[in-house]
């Protein structure tokens, strides 16, 4: 968990519109927006880092600032929902919000509550735990199946679990809920459950799970026999997806797709490249963005750009090591990145294929301009709301933003 950061006045000022011009040379094919990559502003982060660690390459942190030039509006469309975790676009153009206490709510595109959904397995609502993410079957229109993750009691301990069931909207419940996957071993911790879900183009499900924060779990992020600190790829029945990198490796959990993660709370697929992107919490510094590729080790806790909350080094205090993946981008101090979403619409052209990140302690929405899998510009939005932003979803040319306090905002073109 991160301590709450104070947003400086200079970060707020970056939210003001400025003049700018479009760059006609950029395109979807090379993973850029239709705007200029950056207006050359000073980096949005002005606070001193927690360490003197050096990035592995130029632009890996504190990239040039940018400003949105297209007029847009921010509307609060729902409020006081109470301890939410996820907002997810439904295939029919509505929104599903998960509440950590153990139920969901369907809202229409204007934020109006349509239906409360109950009947899910009991969740452990404690610390960072509770009902977490939700994803809809690619054939949801016909089968009404959905999948969700949650923290589950396991004797005196607990773990991250994934279940599926059929949405019975008329009755306000989920029929035949069935647990299909558990991230073992169970530990006695209420922290770092992860967890996000997203289907790939083949109908398999990516699942992220944290290493549970405590030292017993931290070390297991590097162990292939453990599910802790991993991204998984499973079928709709919870089996290892065909072609998984460790499916034939003795002693390895065959569901594992990547490993060496701390607390991955954001997953989305880049619409320009089809690759899976992930964000995860660092300790004191070192929040990071990764492109997740099969079989890769993302380093935690061997390498990190963060330090312990005590101020001591993590492990040997190294940031780069052969065979371990470098983050595409990292933050120090932290912003506490949670849910993420690529902007897939055309209404605000300069946002096309930009990555938007809901930041908790940072109390803003982070907009990242990406070119050739590199971050080339950064902007902070909604920093004036004094809110911890938990999740963000794209739907119908708009971004829907969920706060820890239970408010829902819609960002769209004026």
Image: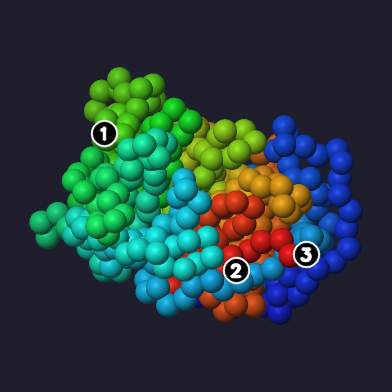
- Given residues 197 and 48, the one toward you in this image is 197
Confirm whether residue 308 shows in the render. no
When the figure is inspected, residue 387 is found, relative to residue 308, above or below; the finding is below
Q: Considering the numbered disc 2 on the image, is that residue within a helix, a strand or a loop? A: strand
Mark 1 or 3, nearer chain start:
3
Can you identify the residue that label 3 sits on?
Answer: 71
Can you identify the residue that label 2 sits on?
Answer: 364
Q: Is residue 77 left or right of residue 134?
A: right
Percent of width and height locating residue 402: 49, 66
**Quadrant (top left/top right/bottom left/bottom right) for the N terminus:** bottom left
Q: CA distance from mark 2 to mark 3?
A: 18 Å
When the figure is inspected, residue 261 is found, relative to residue 118, above or below; the finding is above
Percent of width and height locating residue 406: 44, 73
Identify the residue shown where x is 31% and y is 34%.
Answer: 236
Q: CA distance from mark 2 to mark 1?
A: 37 Å
- Given residues 255 and 58, the one toward you in this image is 255
Which label sits on residue 237?
1
When the figure is inspected, residue 15 is found, relative to residue 59, above or below; the finding is below
In this view, the mark in front (2 or 3): 3
């Amino acid at each position: 968990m991160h301590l709450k950061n104070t947003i400086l006045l200079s970060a707020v000022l970056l939210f003001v519109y400025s003049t700018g011009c479009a760059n006609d040379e950029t395109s979807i094919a090379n993973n850029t927006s239709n705007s200029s990559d950056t207006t050359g502003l000073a980096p949005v982060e002005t606070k001193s880092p927690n360490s003197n660690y050096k990035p592995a390459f130029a632009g890996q942190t504190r990239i040039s600032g940018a400003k949105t030039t297209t007029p847009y509006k921010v509307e609060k469309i729902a409020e006081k929902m109470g301890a939410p975790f996820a907002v997810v676009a439904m295939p029919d153009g509505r929104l599903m919000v998960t509440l950590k206490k153990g139920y969901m709510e369907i809202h229409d595109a204007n934020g109006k509550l349509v239906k409360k959904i109950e009947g899910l397995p009991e969740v452990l609502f404690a610390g960072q735990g509770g009902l977490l993410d939700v994803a809809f079957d690619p054939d949801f229109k016909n089968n009404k199946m959905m999948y969700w993750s949650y923290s589950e009691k396991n004797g005196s301990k607990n773990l991250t679990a994934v279940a599926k069931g059929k949405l019975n909207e008329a009755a306000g419940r989920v029929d035949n809920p069935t647990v299909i996957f558990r991230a073992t071993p169970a530990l006695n911790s209420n922290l770092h459950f992860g967890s996000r879900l997203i289907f790939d183009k083949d109908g398999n499900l990516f699942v992220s799970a944290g290493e549970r924060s405590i030292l017993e779990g931290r070390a297991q992020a590097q162990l292939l026999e453990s599910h802790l600190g991993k991204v998984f790829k499973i079928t709709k029945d919870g089996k290892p997806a065909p072609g998984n990198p460790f499916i034939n490796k003795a002693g390895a959990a065959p569901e594992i797709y990547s490993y060496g993660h701390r607390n991955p709370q954001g997953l989305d697929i880049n619409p320009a490249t089809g690759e899976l992107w992930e964000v995860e919490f660092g300790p004191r510094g070192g929040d990071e963005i990764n492109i997740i590729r099969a079989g890769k080790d993302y380093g935690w806790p061997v390498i990190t750009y963060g330090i312990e909350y005590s101020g001591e080094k993590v492990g040997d205090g190294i940031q780069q090591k052969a065979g371990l993946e470098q983050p595409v981008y990292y933050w120090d101090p932290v912003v506490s990145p949670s849910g993420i979403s690529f902007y897939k619409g055309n209404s605000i052209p300069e946002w096309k294929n930009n990555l938007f990140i809901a930041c908790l302690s940072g109390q803003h929405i982070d907009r990242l301009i990406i070119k050739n899998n590199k971050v080339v510009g950064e902007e902070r939005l909604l920093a004036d709301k004094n809110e911890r932003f938990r999740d963000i979803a794209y739907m119908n040319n708009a971004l829907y933003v969920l706060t820890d306090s239970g408010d829902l905002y819609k960002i769209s073109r004026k």
